[in-house]
Amino acid sequence: MTVNFNSKPLEMFHGAQFANANSIVNLDGDNKLKSNGKLGSALWKSFRSGDTKDANNAIRTQLLKSLGQAFGLSGMTETGGKVTFSRAFMDELEKILGRDVLKTGDFKLNADGAVTSGRPLTQRRISAILLKAAIVGHGDFNVKDYALKLGAINKELAAMGTKTSENKDFAAYFQHIGTCVDFLANDFENLIKKNEYWEANDMLDVSNEGVPRFVIKDPDDPRTKQGSGVPLFTKGNLAKWLGEKSPIHGLFHTELYKNIPNNIDTPEALKALKDYVRSTIILYVQSAIDLYFDAKDAGKLEEYKKAISMETGACMDAKASRPGEIRRELGLFSEEEVNVGVFAEHDASTNLDKCLYEEIKVANNNIDGGAKGWDEIAGTVKKALVGQVRPIMTLDEKNGMIVPLTENGKQVVRAITEADIDRIGPACADILGIF
């Protein structure tokens, strides 16, 4: 069962990382989480006062409220600081998460719909709820959700063992995905910084010829410790570093993307480069992890293993596309999804040109012998994309480059139109070189 999901309302609960899974979670005075003893301990048993029950009800109410917001459920009312929930709300939430995970009896709503049980809420229960919500909910990529899902996968892989070559390959595959998750969560956004020497020269009106405007912060490179970093003159510099020095050791074909300037000497050029790298890693992580749970539910996990053992994809673009290919091979798309190309992997954070690359490949693969030109696939691509909300790209006619469409200095994010696709679709097809 999959439903629309926005994980942002649950951000505060991702912070429930206390020393023990049986730690009792409460709210502090700033509406943040705090540990309040441990379930079953003598300390907890001695403080079953009215205040303790009120504190337990408060955190349970906040959890229900956040879950309702995350899944967009109706039946929640907040009046004068008091939050109540309808029976229909609880039934729908239980249907989404499962009775074994949500345990609605532990909330014990009164006639008004307020939580009254007074039962403690542990980190173990919060973790179980967050994991199930992340598995069944589909929405914008959130690295914390996928770290949770990957943790569950790794436990199952550990139980499977690595005695067979397929199990060993599968474990290695998700180990690399885990490295990518860590890279996204901890390293990527702050990987590139302004070069302080370039900025100093610029302020003093000194020539910056031969000085990179941006540098890569490689902790193992002495230049980083000296206040600079690995020079980032061109997009190829980052591709080389990602392939040889980064923890993910991924091959990125930056040279194939004409919308990314070769010289990374402006903030716009840097943004285009980072957007490509970020979206490619996200696509790889998201599609591989989601396919694991869908294949497991369909009883096709062994087929997923075999497919990965045969081919994982050499470059990062291929790795990002591989789960979609396997999903199709396993028949895990509905007929409607296959017809409209929904199974091309992109989401609300994916730039329009990246969406087009995915949809063009899908449309081309559905034509025996491949398409001969843009006109053969334009209708299929438009059917898949028009109306979806995405960051919009356009064509800079002066240099023929695909660039972000901006208003007041910010990239436009709105529903895609046929005109948007007509403007850059042929150029995207040319970049892919499929005709």
Image (cartoon, rainbow, N blue to C red):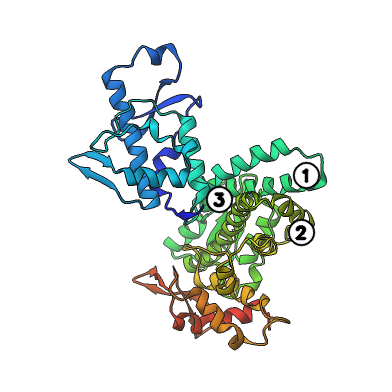
Residue 237 image position (x, y, % from top left): 64, 62
Mark 2 belongs to which amino acid?
Glu
Q: Is residue 404 left or right of residue 30?
A: right
Determine which quarter of the picture holds residue 104: top left
Q: Nearer the viewer, residue 297 or 41?
A: 297
- Spatial CA span between label 1 and label 3: 25 Å
Query: Disc 2 versus disc 3: distance between alpha carbons?
Result: 24 Å
Give the labeled residue for mark 1.
168
Picture residue at 73% right of the left edge, 50% below the top: 302
Q: Are marks 1 and 3 in contact (CB under 8 Å)?
A: no
Which of marks 2 and 1 precedes in the sequence? 1
Q: What numbered label is drawn on residue 349?
A: none
When the figure is inspected, residue 398 is found, relative to residue 105, above or below; the finding is: below
- Residue type, mark 3 in image: Leu
Q: Is residue 420 above or below residue 197?
A: below
Question: Pointer 2: residues within 10 angstroms few (<14), some, or many (20+)?
Answer: few
Local secondary structure at mark 1: helix
> Dot 3 lies on which element?
helix
Q: Position of residue 48 (x, y in %)?
A: 33, 16
Residue indicated by mark 3? 184
Q: Quadrant of the C terminus?
A: bottom right
Q: Which mark is residue 311?
A: 2
| Image spot of residue 207 (x, y percent) | 51, 67
In the picture, measured across the screen, residue 63 lies left or right of residue 377, that is: left
Q: Residues within 10 Å of mark 3 (few under 14, many from 20)?
A: some
Mark 1 residue type = Lys
User: Quadrant location of residue 238?
Assistant: bottom right
Residue found at x 55% / y 50%: 184
Give the structural element (helix, strand or loop) at label 2: loop
Of mark 2 and mark 3, the one earlier in the sequence is: 3
